[in-house]
């Protein structure tokens, strides 16, 4: 009968440990993933802004010298991230690939102009700055038209500010919830040992002596949960980096160190504080209150 009871107690203890580690792992993983998103939110928004193209079209009188001079000007412009020259012939070929028909056959001429597709640096993708750039480009008499999605630029800047604000709010709320969940799991774990705590106290053990093994056990569980969360976060980082290599998330070692170090620190600190408070509470309870 005794071995059966001991096995039951052992299984219950393992189940309790497993639930605590699982809670710590899930909470810290979600918190770390949110932290990665917050840290790299500026990169994400900048990448989106820099993907908005500006097309500059030239009239047919613009010769190679004029086009080369404009290209040289773009290379020296602080607002240009990159650009591509699209010749009349390339534009016709691209149109043929999209439409599936060669319009040159029945038109007998190529009406498409030479153009430059420009991607601006993110800090210049704002309504006031991009209008100034547009005005500057239009001072060139050979430029017939400058086209970019004005509405998309406005929406990008407005929504990015809103999203950044709500991310900070959600992060704060989630951080509090995370601490409460881990604290609850650890308190339940200590609660299951409340009679052992009180028995040790009744036979003369000091509070610090009773508290110490519980605190160290919780810290070990916190380390295991944090370690699993760190492994999962590293895997997530490399997965996202493979999906969006332009962001260079996996190569941002400082951000990775901050997030992973933060996850480890939170796992240790919360488990230590929660267990310390929980054991102190049961140590201060009267025996009748344990029931």
Image: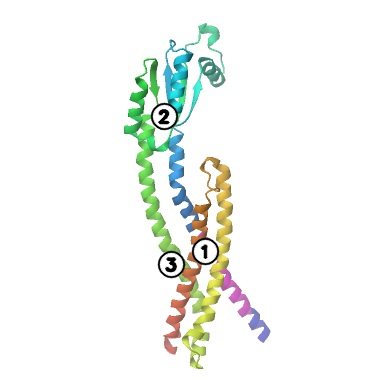
Q: Which residue is mark 3?
A: 180
* Closer to the camera in the image, 23 or 260: 260
Please name which of the two marks, 1 or 3, marks the residue nearer to the observer.
1
| Residue 25 colored in magenta in the image | yes
Residue 284 position (above or below residue 111):
below
- Mark seen at residue 264: 1
Residue 132 position (above or below residue 265):
above
Q: Residue at x 58, y 69 (%)?
A: 18
Please provide the residue range marked out in magenta: 8-28
* Residue 48 rendering spot, x and y as whole percentages: 45, 38
User: Contact, CB < 8 Å: mark 2 with mark 1?
Assistant: no
Please name which of the two marks, 3 or 2, marks the residue nearer to the observer.
2
User: Contact, CB < 8 Å: mark 1 with mark 3?
Assistant: no
Q: Which residue is mark 2?
A: 77
Q: Quadrant of residue 176?
A: bottom left
Which element type, helix, strand or loop, lies under badge 3?
helix
* Viewer can see residue 194: no
* Residue 238 rendering spot, x and y as whole percentages: 58, 49
* Residue 79 rendering spot, x and y as whole percentages: 41, 32
How many residues crowd around disc 3 within 10 Å: few (fewer than 14), some, or many (20 or more)? some
286 sits to left or right of 257: left
Task: First in sequence, mark 3 or 2: give its number.
Answer: 2
Q: Quadrant of residue 10?
A: bottom right
């Amino acid at each position: 009968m005794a071995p059966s009871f001991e096995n039951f107690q052992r299984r219950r203890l393992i189940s309790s440990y497993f639930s605590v580690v699982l809670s710590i792992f899930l909470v810290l993983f979600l918190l770390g993933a949110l932290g990665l998103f917050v840290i790299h939110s500026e990169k994400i928004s900048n990448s989106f802004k820099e993907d908005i193209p500006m097309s500059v079209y030239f009239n047919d009188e613009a010769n190679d010298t004029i086009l080369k001079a404009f290209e040289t000007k773009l290379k020296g412009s602080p607002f240009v991230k990159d650009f591509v020259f699209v010749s009349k012939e390339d534009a016709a070929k691209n149109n043929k690939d999209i439409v599936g028909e060669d319009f040159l056959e029945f038109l007998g001429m190529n009406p498409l102009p030479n153009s430059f597709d420009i991607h601006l640096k993110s800090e210049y993708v704002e309504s006031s700055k991009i209008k100034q750039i547009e005005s500057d480009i239009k001072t060139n008499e050979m430029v017939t038209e400058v086209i970019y999605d004005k509405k998309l630029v406005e929406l990008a800047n407005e929504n990015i500010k809103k999203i950044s604000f709500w991310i900070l709010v959600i992060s704060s709320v989630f951080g509090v919830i995370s601490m409460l969940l881990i604290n609850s799991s650890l308190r339940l774990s200590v609660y299951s040992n409340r009679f052992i705590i009180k028995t040790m106290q009744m036979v003369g053990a000091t509070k610090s002596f009773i508290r110490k093994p519980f605190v160290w056990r919780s810290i070990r569980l916190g380390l295991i949960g944090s370690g699993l969360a760190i492994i999962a976060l590293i895997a997530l980082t490399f997965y996202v980096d493979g999906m969006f290599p332009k962001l260079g998330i996996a190569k941002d070692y400082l951000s990775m160190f901050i997030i992973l170090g933060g996850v480890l620190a939170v796992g240790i600190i919360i488990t230590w504080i929660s267990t310390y408070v929980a054991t102190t509470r049961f140590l201060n309870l009267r025996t009748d209150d344990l029931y």
